[in-house]
Amino acid sequence: MTYRFDGFLLNPATRELHEDGVLVALPARAFDCLAYLIEHRERAVGRDELIAAVWGRTEISDALLNHTIVKLRRSLGDTGNEQRTIRTVPRFGYRWVGAVEALDAEAAPAEPPPPDEAPPAAPAAAEPAAAPAPRRRPSRGPLAAAAAAVAALALGFALAHRQPVAPSAPAVADASAAPGSADDAVAMPALVLPAEVAAPDDWRWLRLGLMDLVANRLRSGALQTMPSESVVGLLRQRSGGDDLLHDPELAKIATLRVQPSARLDGGRWFVRLDAFGSQRSFDVEADADDAIAAARAAADRLLGKLGRRAGAAASSPALDELLQHSGAAMLADQLDQARRLIEAAPAELQRMPRVQHRMAQIELRAGDYAAIEARLQPLLDGAEVRDDGALRARMLLTLAAAYVRDNRAERAGELYEEAIALRRDHADAEALGVAYLGRGVLLAQSGRIDEATAELARARTELKAVGDGLGVAGVDVNLGEFRRMQHRPADALPMFASAVRQFERLGAREGRAYALAQQAGVELELLDAPAALATTARFWPAEAHTSNRRLRWTLAAVRAQALAANGQAAEASALLDALRAGADPARDAVARAEADRLAARLALARGDAAEAARLAAAAAPALRDAVPDARVRALALEAEAARAAGDAPQAQAAVQALRREAGGDGWRAIYAGLAEAQQAWAEQRRGAALEAFAAALAAAARYGVPEDMVAVAAPYVPVLIETSQLDTARAVAGRIAPWADRDLRAATAQARLFRALGQDDAARQAEQGAARLAGGRAGPG
């Protein structure tokens, strides 16, 4: 059945909702809610029943269901006040109350395809290269499996080890406030430096622990404060004197610097905070039997000086010390030490939700995603976490980050939705910024680039509001990846370079490594292999730049690709062998598939076509959902290698798979058309081959990406020469001539053309250039 109501037509079978003939974009869960309510419109549907029917499980929170219904009503032009389509049944659930006409599927009016699914018009031969409209479902970038465009990295930085705090609105300054307004002290984020500690060595952890505590406390008073991760990274990169409080370089980043100092005297802790700003300086002191209590009291007094009021205080001293101590270890990148501290704690302390969340954060940094789900899911189902919105939201974000990195996008999206619903009305900019960032990345992966960009704008605003420069850099690198997804590498390159500079300035080594790998990827697409190799050298060896084993293997795959593109085939092969030997077959499946794809290209370059076909065929399945554009390249390579090996059935099967993969996607049509052209040529169907080559080149020209242009034009030139179409061959070779001095395929095509034209001197020079570029190198594709 299909259902018509209020100008809408719902088809549950095709999962489409049209309004006046125009396709309405609905999230999958909202669509399922709509279909279920309409199909059961004769009665009210209980919340538990609706959750079980739509999500397939019962542990989904009411907040997420409420948010889904709100979004659904908004899409239908309804509101919570009008309730003309979906009525809330108090203390029970919902009921569809709008008038509905049920139609047989055969009697339902045919709806036109949405505008972005209309077949593209063939470009004219002389049409200049232009950036095409965003594709309906662009793929994830080649590093998607590593960090899903830094959504999980942003969580790792923005919420790496902080515990939730209760945000508080600024208070009116009291009579003891220092001269000057609060605004001039916080025009840029405050920065809390590592503490100076005068105590026995077993208290050395307080150096970073108190720094982080004071920063979190200032943040609870709605004072923009740079994340401790950023400060540690900054100081790691910095070379200079010891007077950090008055350092002019730090003054450019934060107008208010805070230097904590702590001393243990007669069993009592004394904590002092020296604050230095652009127009004033002052200090506060506090003492207590416990270092953390003294630091918290001092931070609260500092907020009072600034005319602000701190949020609610934390829990027990034992819990506070464990969280701050393990957090300090994480700041020092000592994940094993952080884990040991928790494992050595009393059992009742270990079982506390905040401590379990800390362990999940450690596992996220270490890349143990399955352990995170096993640890957090039972807690999320419990009453204690359900009633603590701030903690629950952060657990959801940690679990979502694990799902993103583990290629479980739909489940991650649900968790981001719930986190936003939980914190939207609580001024929790920190959690909202990360959730918007994650949701924006997932929207981009489904091809909804405009919506994704809007989400990232929201994320940037929230993260900037809490002084999170790392989160802002994460947003910027994602915007660069969006350009990659639209096959606009020239536009993406400056974005990645800018993000790299931001990460370097903040000392964020993992974010920097990810951004560098993305930069190397676009440099390869732009056929600047030397630049790509130099870029990968900046994050190599991988273990010096990230503790995440998953990301290390992805970085290794990018490094191997750059080595191969520069003719260093032996080094690339050795790295690929190490990757396949050490990477986990399940958790690193995408990195291993990318390794197989590159190994296939290397095998084909050295003449082992059968091995190349085998490796390319092995790579394609794992890339289907994670990196579909890479799968397209793998299938094209499989077809080429199988033909070279004389395996016609395998070649034909790969070409057919490419046709299915292309669908109506303009970019994938380039490689589907190329494979069809080469297959037709091998089968001596010359007319069909020439027509398919021309169409593939026209499609590539619409995007204007050097790698795609060369991939099509280089094999097209010898076909034109053999069919005596020398004028056309000259024109095609001219389109890739700008890259003949740095790409072997383009150089070889030039040499063949010059020989066919009888220009022997030019041919010899081109052949010498090709020989210099040779050496077993495999192209970027």
Image (spheres, grey):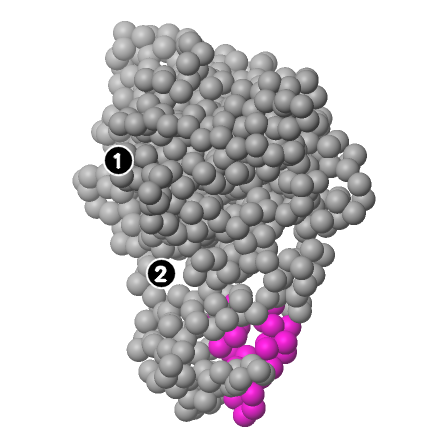
Q: CA distance from mark 1 to mark 2?
A: 60 Å
Find disc 1 in the rendering and name its residue.
180
Taking the view exactly as shown, the residue that stands out farthest to the right is 347
The residue that appears at 70% across and 40% down in the rendered structure is: 318
Q: Quadrant of residue 292?
A: top right
1 or 2: mark nearer the eye: 1
What is the magenta range?
A: 29-55
x and y percent of residue 403 in the render?
A: 60, 48
The residue that appears at 37% across and 28% down in the rendered structure is: 282
Give the left or right position of residue 460, taking residue 154 as reference. Answer: left
Q: Please name whichever residue, 205 or 422, is drawn nearer the observer in this view of the structure.
A: 205
Could you say whether the residue bearing mark 2 is in a helix, strand or loop?
helix
x and y percent of residue 529 in the render?
A: 41, 19
Q: Is residue 613 visible?
A: no
x and y percent of residue 88 in the render?
A: 49, 83
Find disc 2 in the rendering and name its residue.
117
Give the left or right position of residue 367, taking residue 311 as reference. Answer: right
Pointers 1 and 2 in contact (CB under 8 A)?
no
Q: Please name whichever residue, 324 or 431, is drawn nearer the observer in this view of the structure.
A: 324
Q: Is 722 rendered above or below residue 347?
A: above
Q: Is 709 rendered above or below residue 749?
A: below
Q: Which mark is residue 42?
A: none
The residue that appears at 34% across and 77% down in the rendered structure is: 77
Q: Tag 2 or tag 1, which sits nearer the N-term?
A: 2
Could you say whether the residue bearing mark 1 is in a helix, strand or loop?
loop
* Magenta span contains residue 30: yes
